[in-house]
Amino acid sequence: MSLQSEFKKFNDNVRVDFTTKKELSEKRDIILDKLRADDKLPSFKELNQGSYAMCTGIEPEDDQEYDIDVALKFSANKDDYDPIDLKNEIYEILENHTDYGAEIKKPCVTVTYKKEGEVAFHVDLVTYLYEDKDDFNSQLYIANGKNVDSQGWGKADPKGLVDYINDSVEKGDKREQFRRIVRYLKKWKSRRFSSTGHANPSSIGITLMAADNFSYYGDDDLSSLIHIVDIIKDKFYCVGRTDSGRDIYRIKLSLPNSLNFELGNDVFEKMSDVQMTDFKDKIEKLSADLAEVKYEADEQKQYEKLNKIFGDDFEVQEEKNSAKQQHNFIPSSSTSGMK
Amino acid sequence: MECDEVKKILLDNRFISEIEVEQSKAHNDKSYEILIHCKLEVHGKFIPIVVGIPQDWQMVLFDFYWDGEFPYIPHIDKSGKLCLYDLEGTLIDADFQGLLNQCIDSARTLVIKGESGHNKEDFISEFGSYFAMLPNVRTAKVSVPKIKKSINIKFYEKKITREKKESYAHYLSRENNISYFSSSEYDDFKAWGINKTQQNGIYLYIKPTNTIYPPNFLEFEDIGFVNKLFSWVGKDIFNKIRSKCGRNLFVIFEIEQENKITNCCGFKIENPIFAKKDMVIIKKFDKLIPLSVDRIDTQYLLNRTSFTDNTLENKSFLIIGCGSIGGYVLNNLIKSGCKNITLVDDDILKAENVYRHLLGVEYAELYKSVALANYAEKSIPGIRIKSIVEKIQVAIEACVIELANYDYIISTTGNHNVNLWINKFVKNNRLTSTIFYVWNEVLDIGCHVAVIDSEKKFDYEDLFSRDENGELYDLTSFVMKGQNFTRSYSGCGGTFIPYGSTVSLRSSLLFMDILKQYVVGKIQENVLWSEKGDDFYLKKAGFETSDRYKKQQNILEIKNLEYFRKDK
């Protein structure tokens, strides 16, 4: 048993397993077949995007769900459609596909599945159209917006982004470590930020920062993780002060300039200044906590500290598990007499 | 506790954001060791929250306030404070991080349930506490009538007088301290020491077919709520009882909700004008004062002590003997809601009794039965205690007492001779009675309760036997026979058996346990319960314990009398 082997065990515990991936891809294929069978839609080619395509997916927390992002590259000219048109079509085809139906969101149409009565996972279908449908190398545009009022086209390069991430680190041990580090960061994120709204930093933001700054540390995931965390921590810059006197910070991070996205984009644009400052505070805490782990001489205590950071997926053997499920600190008692 | 430590804990909580932590700050007129301003994420909404950490958080936990405008949902008071835990009946594990995270989870759950309406019924179970938060509310102590129909009641208004040099504004600010007392029973006014002028008020019992929730204290629409209550009152009956009232109406509502929970609230309505319609509808008034009702009727007050419907309340009891055990037995009975009790004793409470009697020197030189009756009537409103200053034998033979008139008879004389006489009288006269005999043993070595139902096999006589010489002896006794324990410091008339007050308390409690089991049918045969005490004082005084004492393994032994006899 070594710290590295425990990290790898942790990685095995958090990564999305093959069975789940298979189930997700089966559901995806059923949906795609249904869409293809509908003659109202132009033909399309699909492309996996997001963590599924980058192999950085993690098991969701208890109150979260698995997801798979699928890019639908329609053989259609964006000038022949309003952005909301094809999203509406997809919605109509799939609205009765599952018990939960479908929902049009800003970047996609989401189809939610339940399993044993609970929400289990969802498939996000992202609509792209070409500048010129006859030239598959022409610019792709993502259909944004929930309705006519909020709709808009945005330059996008889904394949370029997946390739950028996957190719950023050479195949083999290095890429494996990179993917593990991203999973650790995503696990930390899911335990420290609410998954609703825009309070949590986007996964693509974290993955991009990890890709751009990854250093291979051999059999030492902890040092590799600390390296990335410290770089993220240092990327914040002060942008002002709140009325109550709190300094506020941001990171501005664009999608790679080499890819065909809108200029001036920012992967963290949806987060408010205060939310970004929370991100800074939390990553600083993570940095300090990881440094404590690194300089802890007692291996058992290292595991306990990592368990506290990452939860029970980072297993602590034998000794008391310090971050077990929160137990009841206010049990009821039969004694009385206060009133 | 340091700010940095607290902030680190909060940074690890995914539902908390925008954290600002300050040392030694006040909020809502309360000082806190640490005050936190933050946002609590609830279903995608970020609620501004203030968390106050008092110095004694290990005892009282943390205070969570909804900062700014908040919705009217259960468990939030008018200062925005969230009621996360009722500290009564809880044990606090003083782990700061664990407690803080648990309170955060609890706050989220409270908001989620409140906003989704999942805990709306909590408004009903805690109706009174929400009503008490209405603006300009006053308090009324009300003995809610037992009879569940709309009737006239009496009320007394305890006014505030303006003090010399007191500004009018200050006097007005104290007006909310005006309080009321109300009951349909004259005795309640007497018992609560109110002998001032009473006025006529109205008690309205309503059974709405849809739930009536407490009015929103954030935006109280007074006439609408009052008319909602009046809509369930018959016009004719209302006019009849209203005709006996003055211009200003004092109205107490008892609302029997759909789920059988009853809620009470009231109003003082100055110069009301009612619409001339078939229904009771107020058109206008000069002033409407909400009255938060503190119920003082026995039925309500006993809720704290009874585990099921109070089966003892309407039973009649005869206590024979008002000494040490009798006093504690009476006290236990009245605290259990028993109201119909007769006491028989011809003895006078002396100074030497007070260290092992319920009553103290203020009752000295009174007959014990009279003194106990006085004590009981002062303690519990509406109670009726009859005292008979006679020996039990005289009272029965002179027909002052008819044993058959009582549901339960308790002999607490601790005197086997009196008990054997009662036992024989019941047998000879073929009376159908259940008698509880309660007695102590000497020097705190134990106590006993025998339950004898005259219709069942074996009776009090079976607790005795004769030895090889034909001498009668007590089979129940924890002390070896043939020893003399009586003491006297004042000649023959002042002999006594030494035992302490605590053994009388124990025997009275043992009796209550048996009585409660008996009334619910858990005791079917005549039984003897014997509780063993420590033999330290007995041995120290040079006495010997009996074989029974030595053989009894457990503190408490319960024996069916049939088996008890067989064992002997």
Image (cartoon, coloured by chain):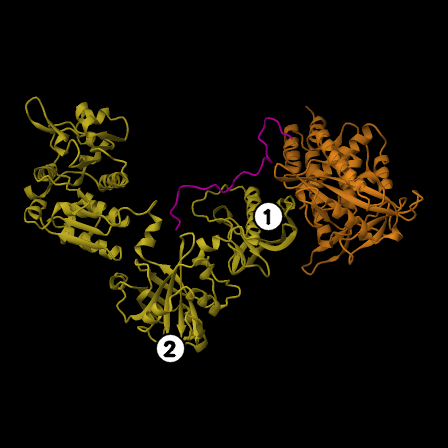
Q: Amino acid at mark 2?
A: Lys
Q: Residue B164 appears at what percent x and percent y?
A: 38, 77
Which chain is rendered orange in the image?
A: A
User: Is A138 situated left or right of B414 in this image?
Assistant: right
The quarter of the displayed image where residue B424 is located: top left
- Which labelled disc corresponds to residue B164? 2
Q: Chain of mark 2?
A: B
- Locate residue B89: give its quadrant: top left
User: What label does residue B2 carry, if any?
Assistant: 1
Q: Is residue B33 visible?
A: no
* Badge 2 density bin: few <14, some 14–19, many ≥20, Cα 10 Å: few
> Closer to the camera: disc 2 or disc 1?
2
**Separation (CA) of disc 2 from disc 1:** 50 Å
* Residue stretch rendered in magenta on the structure: A315-339
Residue B194 visible in the displayed image = yes
Left or right of A73, for residue B32: left
Mark 2 falls on what kind of element?
loop
- At label 1, the amino acid type is Glu
Query: Is-magenta flag for residue A265?
Result: no
By secondary structure, the bulk of the magenta-drawn segment is best described as loop
Residue A305 position, x and y percent, is: 65, 35
